[in-house]
Image (tube, rainbow, N blue to C red):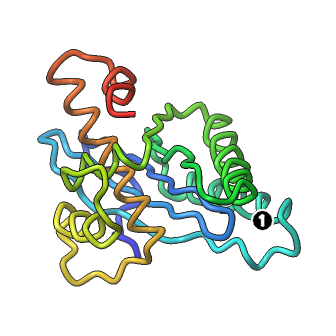
Amino acid sequence: MSHPASTPCPGAVRILGIDPGSQRTGVGVIDVAADGRCVFVHARALRLLDAEDFPSRLGLLCDGLEALLDEWRPQQVAIETVFMDKSATSALKLGHARGAALATVVRRHLPVSEYPPRVIKQSLVGRGAADKQQVQHMVRLLLNLPDARLQADAADALAVALTHAHMSATASRTGVATHLLRRRGA
């Protein structure tokens, strides 16, 4: 799902949100206008299961992000931090996927901000324990996408981007560094 503009509106900041995963990684791109309004640009899930093995999945992830960075040219990147699941193996694979995504972005010299899931939910819904449906509802509402059928991973990536937009605006208004705002909510 995409908006036609591959370059940000004049004065806007383009943010790439990443919801890392070892099977699918959600990516969402928004523009934040000078007045603070967030505009939907692009969202999708990078499907990684077509690869033969796990290292090849990481290669697909890097290739997909490289293509996305070339096409949409974000100026800032926000990524969800790893949460501990019941399975240590799953958490480790998620950490590998997140590391591959971070390495791809950092090689482009883009600024990266990281947000825990609870902070993302708190930022969008007002509750750190909000469920996925509540987060998706707020993503649709904030980006004026009432009828959009967003894939769950893509919606989560847009939520990460929106959180970064809100945190950056708060930091700008208060003069507090963004990393201090994130630390408080972690």
The amino acid type of the residue labelled 1 equals Arg
Instruction: Estimate the x, y position of residue 61 in percent, counting from the top left.
Output: 69, 60
Residue pictured at 73% horizontal, 56% vertical? 93
Residue nearest the observer in this picture, 12 or 42? 42
Residue nearest the observer in this picture, 23 or 39? 23
Label 1 CA crowd tier, 10 Å (few <14, some 14–19, many 20+) = many
Residue 37 vs 57, above or below: the answer is: above
Residue 181 vs 72, above or below: the answer is: above
Q: Which residue is the site of mark 1? A: 57
Residue pictured at 43% horizontal, 59% vertical? 157
In the image, 3: left or right of 107? left
Residue nearest the observer in this picture, 42 or 171? 171
SS assignment at label 1: helix
Residue 155 vs 108, above or below: the answer is: below
Residue pictured at 59% horizontal, 56% vertical? 85
Residue 173 vs 121, above or below: the answer is: above
In the image, 181: left or right of 65? left
| Corner quadrant of residue 183 | top left
Instruction: Estimate the x, y position of residue 70 in percent, counting from the top left.
Output: 58, 53
Q: Quadrant of the N terminus?
A: bottom left
Tell how many labels: 1
* Outermost residue toward the left in this view: 35
Instruction: Estimate the x, y position of residue 136 in percent, counting from the top left.
Output: 30, 69
Residue pictured at 68% horizontal, 48% vertical? 95
* Outermost residue toward the top in this view: 175
Instruction: Estimate the x, y position of residue 174 in percent, counting from the top left.
Output: 16, 19
Q: Quadrant of the C terminus?
A: top left
